[in-house]
Amino acid sequence: QKEVEQNSGPLSVPEGAIASLNCTYSDRGSQSFFWYRQYSGKSPELIMSIYSNGDKEDGRFTAQLNKASQYVSLLIRDSQPSDSATYLCAVNRDFGNEKLTFGTGTRLTIIP
Amino acid sequence: NAGVTQTPKFRILKIGQSMTLQCAQDMNHNYMYWYRQDPGMGLKLIYYSVGAGITDKGEVPNGYNVSRSTTEDFPLRLELAAPSQTSVYFCASSSPDGYNEQFFGPGTRLTVL
């Protein structure tokens, strides 16, 4: 089992709809969770961080964390063509651990 | 703040040549990282450093070397370049606050022919 798993996609979502991206992790003690957006040919950009169970909202983005079920998700409301990118999930296994474990990413395409 | 900067943006090397990829950050972050990303693939950690004078191997260190003489700079050295090192290289940094939010530089696209 991979430490951090994501569906590679591609995930196609109509413009204006909600895009839902999921990530599961294997280490039950993981503490910090991140979503990065990576446009083609560009570097990963941190868009959301979440540390506690529940939802965290930032503009059109909502991160959801469920430590009991070991998954973290990212919802993008009112999807725009500019949201088309690969989304990477990253997990910090222990508080103070200097390394992140990255998933391989989900490619999202927003269809106008 | 410029954040994390990397030079060069692009480079073509011949097999057997050497080069140094430069990385600098101005956020006073202790932790710095080098990743490589092959086309369509995820990020693989090459080396990382938790402070000046301290470096450690990641999952794919063979063929690379690093040094960390200052907090700001973390160069990656490729010795005897091979076609397998054709990749995009990203440098990242984070503060030692425990959460490890990493911020990435723009990357260096390297081709070895």
Image (cartoon, rainbow, N blue to C red):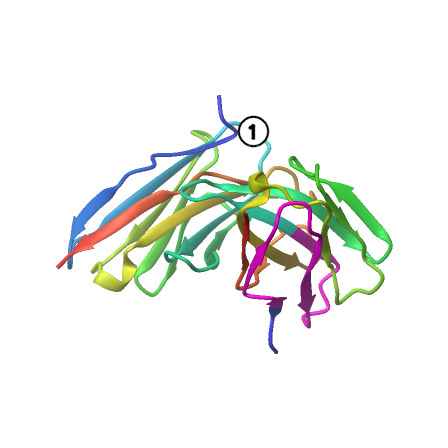
Residue A6 seen: yes
Residue at 73 percent across and 68 percent down: it is: B28
Q: Which residues, given as a range, are shown in magenta?
A: B5-33
Residue A99 seen: no
Choose top left, top right, bottom left or bottom right for residue A56.
bottom left
Q: Name the one closer to the observer, B67 or A13.
A: B67
Residue at 70 percent across and 40 percent down: it is: B63
> Which residue is label 1 attached to?
A27
- Determine whether B111 is above or below A11 in the image: below
Seen in the image, is A99 located left or right of residue B11?
right
In which chain is the residue bearing label 1?
A: A
Check if residue B23 falls in the magenta segment. Answer: yes
Where's residue B49, x and y in %? 76, 51
Check if residue A11 falls in the magenta segment. Answer: no
Seen in the image, is A34 located left or right of residue A81?
right
Where's residue B103, x and y in %? 57, 60
Residue at 73 percent across and 47 percent down: it is: B79
Q: Identify residue type, mark 1.
A: Asp
Q: Name the one closer to the observer, A93 or B56.
A: B56
Where's residue A19, x and y in %? 24, 49
Q: Name the one closer to the observer, A33 or B81.
A: B81
Figure label count = 1
Where's residue B9, x and y in %? 54, 65
Choose top left, top right, bottom left or bottom right for residue A112.
bottom left
Choose top left, top right, bottom left or bottom right for residue B93.
bottom right
| Extreme residue in the bottom direction | B1
- Determine whether A24 is above or below B73 in the image: above
